């Protein structure tokens, strides 16, 4: 029996049966990778859609924050302080109290008026800070959702890259399998000679 005949018998025997099984297995791996890719994309879409209302809400709050900040809430002017609701009434009460004591133009009355003004300024500044924090919190809802979406995109991208690489390897292995089998058969037959 000649060398080529041995190779032919060996190749057509068990080796091709093994090759067909391997080929089917590799095709199954390709299919599995494809399903994994589809599922990864589906999960990304679901997660991104779930975050959409929070992103949209946070985005809608940005203009309110910008408008508030453009009014310089960190350094209110005295005009802003004196235009606060009830300021004139409260100032009048301080002045009336001093007038009733007969000390409207005394140092104590001026100190009381100055303390009142400083207290009103601090109160407005604290309210502005609280409003700023509230507005920042609303904007941060969107920021957190956008960050979560970016994390989903990054994780999905990494997972998809791995799945695509695995799918490519499975496809390469499947198409390279006949050559590997032929080379293995030739090597085996040459070793038996």
Image (spheres, rainbow, N blue to C red):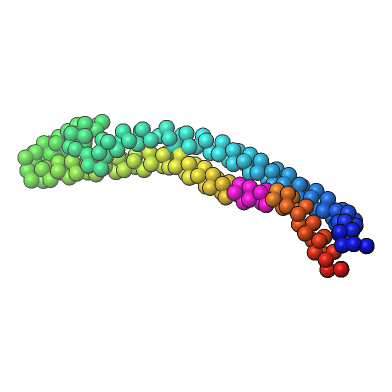
Please tell me whether residue 133 is drawn above or below residue 89 in the rendered image: below
Location of residue 187 by image quarter: bottom right
Identify the residue shown where x is 50% and y is 44%.
150
Residue 142 placement, left or right of 188 = left
Viewer-nearest residue: 176 or 28: 176
Labels in figure, total:
0
**Residue 141 visible:** no
Viewer-nearest residue: 12 or 165: 12
**Residue 67 visible:** yes
Q: Quadrant of the N terminus?
A: bottom right
Identify the residue shown where x is 8% and y is 46%.
107
Identify the residue shown where x is 25% and y is 43%.
74
Location of residue 76 by image quarter: top left
Residue 173 placement, left or right of 124 = right
Q: Quadrant of the C terminus?
A: bottom right
Specify the farthest residue to the right.
1
Specify the farthest residue to the front.
2
Identify the residue shown where x is 48% and y is 41%.
146
Please tell me whether residue 189 is drawn above or below residue 80 in the rendered image: below
Query: Please, what is the dominant secondary structure of the magenta stretch?
Result: helix
Viewer-nearest residue: 19 or 179: 179
Residue 85 lies, in percent from the top left, at 26, 31
Residue 152 placement, left or right of 11 = left
Viewer-nearest residue: 112 or 155: 155
Q: Is residue 167 magenta?
A: yes
Residue 41 lies, in percent from the top left, at 62, 41
Q: Which residues are magenta?
A: 159-170
Residue 181 lies, in percent from the top left, at 79, 56
Q: Is residue 57 magenta?
A: no
């Amino acid at each position: 029996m000649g060398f080529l005949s041995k190779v032919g018998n060996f190749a057509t025997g068990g080796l091709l049966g093994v090759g067909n099984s391997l080929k089917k297995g590799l095709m199954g791996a390709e299919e599995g990778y494809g399903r994994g890719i589809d599922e990864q994309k589906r999960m990304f879409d679901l997660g991104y859609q779930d975050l959409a209302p929070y992103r949209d809400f946070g985005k809608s709050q940005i203009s309110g924050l910008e408008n508030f900040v453009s009014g310089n809430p960190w350094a209110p002017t005295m005009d802003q302080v004196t235009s606060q609701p009830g300021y004139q009434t409260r100032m009048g009460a301080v002045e009336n109290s001093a007038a009733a004591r007969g000390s409207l133009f005394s140092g104590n009355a001026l100190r009381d008026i100055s303390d009142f003004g400083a207290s009103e300024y601090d109160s407005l500044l604290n309210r502005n800070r609280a409003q700023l924090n509230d507005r920042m919190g609303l904007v941060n809802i969107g920021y957190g959702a956008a960050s979560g979406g970016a994390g989903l995109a990054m994780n999905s991208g990494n997972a998809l890259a791995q799945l695509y690489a695995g799918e490519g390897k499975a496809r390469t292995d499947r198409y390279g399998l006949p050559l590997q089998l032929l080379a293995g058969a030739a090597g085996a037959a040459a070793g038996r000679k």
